[in-house]
Amino acid sequence: MQYSILYEAINDPGFPPGYYYAHIPSLDLTTHGRGIDGAKAAAQELIQVWIETKRGHGEKVPVESESFFSRIEVDDALFGA
Protein backbone atom coordinates (compact mmCIF):
# COMPACT_ATOMS: atom_id res chain seq x y z
CA MET A 1 0.00 0.00 0.00
CA GLN A 2 1.12 3.54 -0.66
CA TYR A 3 -0.01 6.72 1.06
CA SER A 4 0.74 10.33 0.16
CA ILE A 5 2.40 12.51 2.79
CA LEU A 6 2.35 16.31 2.88
CA TYR A 7 5.27 17.88 4.76
CA GLU A 8 4.98 21.30 6.40
CA ALA A 9 7.63 23.18 8.37
CA ILE A 10 6.55 23.76 11.98
CA ASN A 11 6.59 27.44 12.84
CA ASP A 12 5.65 27.09 16.50
CA PRO A 13 7.84 28.45 19.31
CA GLY A 14 7.16 25.22 21.22
CA PHE A 15 9.21 23.25 18.66
CA PRO A 16 12.93 23.64 18.01
CA PRO A 17 13.86 24.82 14.49
CA GLY A 18 14.02 22.18 11.76
CA TYR A 19 10.92 20.14 12.67
CA TYR A 20 8.23 19.23 10.14
CA TYR A 21 4.66 18.00 10.29
CA ALA A 22 3.87 14.95 8.17
CA HIS A 23 0.20 14.86 7.17
CA ILE A 24 -1.32 11.64 5.77
CA PRO A 25 -4.60 12.98 4.33
CA SER A 26 -6.24 9.70 3.29
CA LEU A 27 -5.91 8.34 6.85
CA ASP A 28 -6.52 11.70 8.59
CA LEU A 29 -3.25 11.32 10.53
CA THR A 30 -0.51 13.81 11.40
CA THR A 31 2.82 13.37 13.13
CA HIS A 32 6.13 15.24 13.20
CA GLY A 33 9.88 14.75 13.16
CA ARG A 34 13.20 16.53 12.83
CA GLY A 35 13.77 17.34 9.18
CA ILE A 36 11.94 15.74 6.28
CA ASP A 37 13.61 12.39 6.92
CA GLY A 38 12.57 12.41 10.59
CA ALA A 39 9.00 13.34 9.71
CA LYS A 40 8.89 10.63 7.05
CA ALA A 41 10.17 7.99 9.50
CA ALA A 42 7.59 9.09 12.09
CA ALA A 43 4.84 8.88 9.46
CA GLN A 44 5.95 5.39 8.42
CA GLU A 45 5.85 4.18 12.01
CA LEU A 46 2.49 5.85 12.70
CA ILE A 47 0.90 4.33 9.58
CA GLN A 48 2.14 0.85 10.46
CA VAL A 49 0.83 1.05 14.04
CA TRP A 50 -2.45 2.57 12.87
CA ILE A 51 -3.00 -0.23 10.30
CA GLU A 52 -2.14 -2.94 12.85
CA THR A 53 -4.61 -1.42 15.32
CA LYS A 54 -7.40 -1.15 12.73
CA ARG A 55 -6.88 -4.73 11.57
CA GLY A 56 -6.70 -5.92 15.18
CA HIS A 57 -10.18 -4.47 15.73
CA GLY A 58 -11.48 -6.00 12.49
CA GLU A 59 -11.88 -2.58 10.85
CA LYS A 60 -11.27 -1.75 7.20
CA VAL A 61 -8.06 0.03 6.25
CA PRO A 62 -8.58 2.72 3.59
CA VAL A 63 -6.51 2.42 0.44
CA GLU A 64 -5.51 5.64 -1.27
CA SER A 65 -6.45 5.54 -4.93
CA GLU A 66 -5.22 8.91 -6.15
CA SER A 67 -3.80 12.06 -4.63
CA PHE A 68 -3.23 15.62 -5.84
CA PHE A 69 -1.53 18.62 -4.27
CA SER A 70 -2.01 22.25 -5.16
CA ARG A 71 -1.33 25.70 -3.71
CA ILE A 72 -3.35 28.89 -3.96
CA GLU A 73 -2.43 32.46 -3.15
CA VAL A 74 -4.73 34.49 -0.93
CA ASP A 75 -4.69 38.31 -1.03
CA ASP A 76 -3.05 39.76 2.11
CA ALA A 77 -5.80 42.41 2.23
CA LEU A 78 -8.21 39.72 3.42
CA PHE A 79 -6.32 39.48 6.71
CA GLY A 80 -6.72 43.18 7.61
CA ALA A 81 -4.16 45.67 8.77
Image: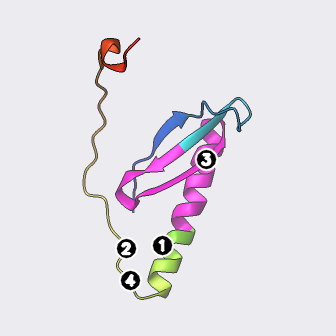
**Mark 4–mark 1 distance (CA, rounded to whole Å):** 9 Å
**Mark 3–mark 2 distance (CA, rounded to whole Å):** 22 Å
Give the labeled residue for mark 4: 59
**Mark 1–mark 2 distance (CA, rounded to whole Å):** 6 Å
- Disc 3 element: strand
Q: Amino acid at mark 3?
A: His
Q: Amino acid at mark 4?
A: Glu
Q: N-terminal of the two: label 3 or label 2?
A: 3
Q: N-terminal of the two: label 1 or label 3?
A: 3
Which quadrant of the rendered structure holds the C terminus?
top left
- Disc 1 element: helix
Is the C-beta separation of discs 1 and 2 under 8 Å? yes
Residue at 27%, 40% (x, y): give it: 68
- 39 inside magenta stretch: yes
**The disc label shown at residue 32, or none:** 3
Is the C-beta separation of discs 4 and 2 under 8 Å? yes
From the top left corner, tell me how far across and down residue 29 is, in percent.
Answer: 47, 57
Q: Nearer the viewer, residue 64 or 77?
A: 77
Give the class, few, some or many, for how many residues have Cα within 10 Å of label 4's Cα (few <14, many ≥20).
few
Q: Amino acid at mark 2?
A: Val
- Disc 2 element: loop
Characterize the magenta stretch by its predominant secondary structure.
Answer: helix
From the top left corner, tell me how far across and down residue 17 is, in percent.
Answer: 71, 29
**The disc label shown at residue 61, or none:** 2
